[in-house]
Amino acid sequence: MGMTMTQKILSAHAGLESVQAGELILVNLDLVLGNDITSPVAIKEFSKLGKDSVFDKNKITMVMDHFAPAKDIKSAQQCKICRDFCSEKEITHFYDVGKMGIEHALLPEQGLVSAGYAVIGADSHTCTYGALGAFSTGVGSTDMACGMAIGKAWFKVPSAIKFNLTGKLRKYVSGKDVILNIIGKIGVDGALYKSMEFSGEGLSSLSMADRLCIANMAIEAGAKNGIFAVDDITLDYIKAHGGAEPVIYKADDDAVYDEVIEINLTEIEPTVAFPHLPENARTFDQFGEIKINQVVIGSCTNGRYEDLLEAAEIMEGKKCAENVRVIVIPATQEIYLKAMENGLLKIFIESGAVVSTPTCGPCLGGYMGILAEGERAVTTTNRNFVGRMGHTESEIYLASPAVAAASALTGRITSPWEVM
Amino acid sequence: MKYTGDVIKYGDNIDTDVIIPARYLNTSDRKELASHCMEDLDKTFVSRVKAGDIVTAGYNFGCGSSREHAPIAIKASGVSLVIAKSFARIFYRNSINIGLAIVECPEAVDGISEGDKIEADMDSGIIKNLTTGKEYKTEPFPEFIQKIIENGGLIQSIADGIIK
């Protein structure tokens, strides 16, 4: 029986000729990731193993991004635990303030992930790297601890849903609209325990930024991983970012899928996910005027340069609406610098937005943009659960950078097609 | 392994942000996490949960973030077992890895009400509702996972050389 792309990567990393959905296997890992929230718990668990060293100091990375630069004393302590551990174990890829960025934007940019890799990260959005043709999935801190110790993780081999992409996205429609549309279709547990495999002729029109955004939110459909077939766009990206030699795994022609879903990219419209689940996706013909108090453009989902560029194009020479707070967060130092050099930051600041240092802060209600009771935000982040960005009586609407930028100008949830 | 306790019942898609809000993730202290467990969903949980209580929930329990703080907070609250119609996958593996007992059984969840007394025998896979007298059967864990749980979690399994 043929294997899916994910099954092929897993079987190769388990040293097996083939695997089948449902099989429990032990997988060799190419990279183990943690952040300032999840790593301290992993470090505590790691210490119980009594091991002097990690399995490979070059295959572990820790990124201080959630509550860093430290928002309070407790967060500072958490970062210190990570800093001390990485120093003691001589971890090569430790990213602290000044070098750090939001982990899932940072790792591909720094060339730490390549096609064919098997990656675990103690962060649910680790599924992002599937955009590079890697098997990559979020786990907890104990898995991270064991990954650091023995370089392995246990998995139940997933079955898969195939998404056959055709057509081409229209102007101001991006990967975010695609994934919100898909989650709206299949639900927040529509891909539970499964792989979401993206392929088809439509792939050639999707930028890496679009693909990273789509793979990033696979977890929002409950998936174990999202993964894209490797093409020249992937290979060019990996090469440009100094990634390791890619290993290309292709799904077998006779691979068995639970379901094949056709997605015509040309038909995708600007899409917004209403509170309080990412599956509450609606297009602009399905709702009326919704006033907002805050806009956030950033996160591991949509804080990349292409995202900022699209937002800047819409906001250039215009002013943000009265009484709307607009927060722009470039996801990494490199993106920040490029946005500065190319005049994007000037556009944002002149329009009345603030620009922050890279941080996950507001996305998970940490800091840098918490919502008060009754407030509403349009945000390019990934979750709109109750209380996610602040008060339990606040509301989060998930959207693309283009929708967020258009909404910043009007003070209500607005389609980019209306203002451009 | 047998668990007996009173039921606290929740619905579908209970996410890790309501199980333990991110504003409390600046600590990994179990007791402190437990003191905020379920806070954004049910402010009464912390004051009414007793040692041994059993939580039941609908589909996709524990969806969202990978924070292990979520199953840790539930376990440290005294909850002995979570029965759900389904679990989000990261929450599921985190629970196994830290030794929080969990089981999927949609029929049991439908047949159990808030406050019922439950006895769950994980070896036989029988969940008994002692209040109504009804019984439900679940699938036992695969052997590989059973080994991890019996050995007290993933860390102990590696320390003992069961997983190399």
Image (cartoon, rainbow, N blue to C red):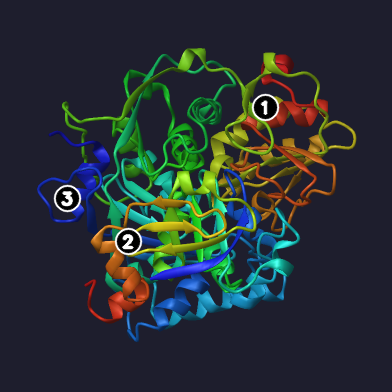
Please state the chain letter of the residue tagged with numbered disc 3 in the rendered image: A
N-terminal label among 3 and 1: 3
Q: Quadrant of the N terminus of chain A?
A: top left
Q: Nearer the viewer, residue A52 or A162?
A: A162
Looking at the image, which residue is at 83% across and 29% down?
A291
Looking at the image, which residue is at 71% across and 60% down?
B39
2 and 1 marks on the same chain: no
Q: Nearer the viewer, mark 3 or mark 1?
A: 3
In the rendered image, the residue lying farthest to the right is A322
Query: Which residue is disc 1 drawn over?
Result: A403
Q: Nearer the viewer, mark 2 or mark 1?
A: 2
Amino acid tagged 2: Ser
Query: Which residue is disc 3 drawn over?
Result: A12
- Where residue A188 sits in the image (x, y, percent)? 52, 37
Q: Nearer the viewer, residue A383 or B127?
A: B127
Whether residue A202 is visible to the viewer of this picture, yes or no, is: yes
10 Å crowding of disc 1: few (<14), some (14-19), many (20+)? many
- Where residue B133 sits in the image (x, y, percent)? 50, 55
Query: Which residue is disc 2 drawn over?
Result: B124
Q: Is residue A6 shown above or below A254?
A: below
Name the element at disc 2: loop
Amino acid tagged 3: Ala
10 Å crowding of disc 3: few (<14), some (14-19), many (20+)? some
